[in-house]
Each structure stands twice: as C-alpha cells, then as structure tokens.
Amino acid sequence: MSNTRLPLRALRCALAAASLLAVAAPCASATDVVLAAVPGESFSQTATTVAFNDSAAEGGRAQALYSGVATTASVKLTSAATSFTVRARGSECAGAPSLQLLVDGASVAVWSVTTNTYVNYAVTRSVAAGTHTLTLRLTNDYMSSACDRNLFVDTVRALGPAAVSAPTTPSSVTAVAVNPKLRWAPPALTTPATVNVAQGDQVVTLDKTKDYILNLGTATHLGALSIAGGRNVVLKGGAIALPATSTKNTALVIKDNVGTVHVEGVLFDGTQHEMDAIQIVAPSSTVQVENVRAVGLLGSFDTNHSDVIQPYGGVAKLRVDHLSADSNYQGIFTRPDLAPIGSVELQDVDLAFDNAAAGATGGYLLWMTTNCKMAPTTLSNFYIAPRTGTTVGTAVWPATNDSSCPSKQTGNGVTFPRLPVTGGVIGGAPPAGAFVPAGKAGVAYTSPGYQ
C-alpha cells in the first residue's frame, strides 16, 4: 500500500474532533479495526433516499440522497467504538453538498463532500457497545435548471481497538515434514458459472449468491484483476503481470466476497511495474492461497510498499500453503488496518529479500502487528532470507528491538512470545529449495491434489 504520513493525519483529526468538522482522512488509530460496516444501501428507503447500482461502490451498490430527508440504519457494536468513517461522493451544484452523520440523534460530524469519487470521511467519536441508530442527511439540498446537488454513500464504518489474545508461542522453531499435496481443497461449488477474464485491467463483479470459476487463459494476463463479490470463487492457474505503463498498484484484489475464494497455482510477475501481488478487502470471507509464486516485487517507502499478500480491508480466515516470493520491500502484511482479521495460517512459505533491487532501507517480509494488536496466527515452515548483512530478526515486525512486544531470536529462529502466534520464522531458504519453484505456478499449472 502507499505510504500514509501519520503526523499530518493526527493533526487534522485533532482539529476535526475539536470543531465537529470532520476530514476526508483516516482518523482512527493505526491499531483500530472495523467493528461494524453498514452498507449505504441498507439505510432506509424513501422517494428521495434511494439504493442504486454503482460499480464504484465496494459492494456494487450505494445509497443516493437526493433531498434533505434523513435516512437511517441500526448498527450493533460488540465493543465500544472510538471513531466512524463514511465512504461517500457528491455532485456539486453551485457548491458542494454537505453530509451530516448522527449517532442516536446526536450530530457527530458534517462534511463538505467536494469530490465525485468515493473518499473516506472520518471523525473521532466514542460510542458504547450496544445497538445504535445511524442517520445520514444532505443538509444543503439545491437544484437549478442546470444542475442538481446530491450525495452518494457507499459504507459507514464504526472502528475501535481490537482485543489481543493470549500468547501461545513456543520457545523454539523447528521445521516439519512437507506434504506435496495441498492442505486446503477448493470449496464445493454449486452450479458454478465460468468467467473467462479478458486482457487488461478488469473488475469482475459477481453475484454474492452464486459460485464461480475464473479462468485467466493460456497467456499472461497483462493488467490488474479485481474480483468483487461472489459466494465461492475458484481461480486456479494462470499468470498476472502489470505492464510498465500501468496506472494500478495491485495485481489481484479480492473484495466483498461472502464465501471462500481459492487462489491456486497463479504466478505474479512484478518485474515491470511496482505492485502488490494480492490485496484482500473481504472481512466475511475465507481466502485460500496455495502453490502461488510472486517474483520481482518492487517498492519503496515513498511509493508502493509492494506486499505479497495484504488483507488491509479484513478477512475472516487467511490460509496460505506453499508460497514462494521475493520482494525488495515487504512480504506478507497481516496487521489489521481497516477491518478485522479473524485468523491467519501460513504454512510452507519462503520469502526472500531481493538484494539486487534493494533500494531504500525499510520494509519487513512479515509484518503482523502494530502496538501488539493482531489476529491469532500460526506459522509452520515459514522461511525468510533477509537483507544481506542483517539477521532474520530484523526482517519481521515486531522485531527483536521492539519496545512493546519484541520478538525473540534464538539461533536461526524467531518466535513471538508476547503475541498470539503459534510457531515462528526460520532464517534462510528451505533446505530442499523453494516450496513453489520456477515453472510450478503459471499458465501450465497442474494441481498436486489435496490432503
């Protein structure tokens, strides 16, 4: 993901909290997670507050506010919230529309929505656990013979601190036997539809009540692919690369799925353009990544952080078995950012720092937490070859020098005694070579079967 400059964000959020004029920036703490997400289209419907199809919205639907009539929805919080975000856009007419958010009838924020593309507007606000009423209102409706001032709301989110589970880490790390068959089989599909993905940047919008098989074809797919929606989805084999002229920064986005997304045997090639291999924005989904290879991932602190896998928008379960990748910046990034991560299992994984394309310092090949908040995580046969001249303990976060929940390096192994992590990281490469060597994943992929 691209870099966020926290000092400026903190200043803007402090000013917003003082004035009740919120800002289009993430005001939540970096360690907060999404406690609840309320789709705009689930708010009450009237003649002038209408749900409609919108391909730019996260779930393909949004709520239009065509007048000053309020629209409401309820939200249930299992723990206290500390902030709210509203993803919205507007159409100007002799000025920008103003969007008001109320919680239980009390005004929380008023935003001037000055863009016709979706932006997250955020405000700090403490709300106790329980069921609450959210209200949205266009406060300055206006229409002339030439234009109409309107609002469009995608999602309202309540955020708050995540709980930290009790640590289960052993004091040492040992390798275990590798099973050539994959641990997780694809989900059972009911009358699946097959989607042949065309070349170029593609957003494949799927019905959340149906199952799908995606086919990348026999040539490398040149362009970004976003899978939006669907129930159970299987993508097996194929290759994805972003061309040098691409304006995208992610090869594969998994978004708003409600079942299991199974990605197997795919080759990601980042040698021509900075990119993340896989980003996930699917807090209700199980995502399985198996027999995947990612090569040539390039990035930097000031541009793209170039992760191999990043569920920044949440995932119910992340399962990885047999993954090989190299990167000059970051690898697997499972810190909870904008939505909760239920659990993480990483098995038979080898990540290597690309010293030939080292560039600026920074980045970690495994980043699991900030301020000790993270999902329960299991690491098995997880190998990291760090930057030349450094130890494996500096290639993970938390590192051994973290003041809050430091990792512990013993010999060539790193464990995380203060975190909910089972297993640990082994320095170097797997003794028998990469778990997914060159030629195994890609357009000619053949699955080895499942355990």
Image: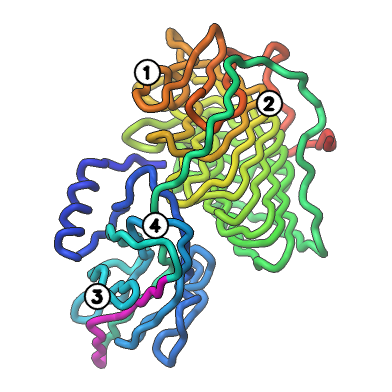
Q: Is residue 103 visible?
A: yes
| Residue that numbered label 1 is attached to | 401
Where residue 186 sits in the image (x, y, percent)?
Answer: 77, 47
> Decide: marks 2, 1 in contact (CB < 8 A)?
no
30, above or below 13, in the image? above
Query: Which colouring convention does the figure follow?
Result: rainbow
Marks 3/2: CA–CA distance = 51 Å
The reply, left or right, for residue 134 in relation to residue 442 is left
Crowding around mark 3 (Cα neighbors within 10 Å: few <14, some 14 to 19, many 20+) is: many
Q: Name the residue type under label 2.
A: Asp
Marks 2/1: CA–CA distance = 26 Å
Viewport quadrant of the C terminus: top right
Image disc number at residue 348: 2
Relative depth, front residue between 38 and 328: 38
Q: Earlier in the sequence, mark 3 or mark 4?
A: 4
Of badges 2 and 1, the one in the foreground is: 1
Crowding around mark 1 (Cα neighbors within 10 Å: few <14, some 14 to 19, many 20+) is: few
Marks 2/4: CA–CA distance = 38 Å
> At 25% from the left edge and 68% from the top edge, which residue is drawn?
109
Q: Earlier in the sequence, mark 3 or mark 2?
A: 3
Q: Secondary structure at mark 2?
A: strand
Image disc number at residue 98: 3
| Residue that numbered label 4 is attached to | 80
Crowding around mark 2 (Cα neighbors within 10 Å: few <14, some 14 to 19, many 20+) is: many
Where residue 327 sits in the image (x, y, percent)?
Answer: 50, 26
Q: Secondary structure at mark 1?
A: loop
Residue segment shown in magenta = 132-145
> Decide: marks 3, 2 in contact (CB < 8 A)?
no
Of badges 3 and 4, the one in the foreground is: 4
Predominant secondary structure, magenta span: strand
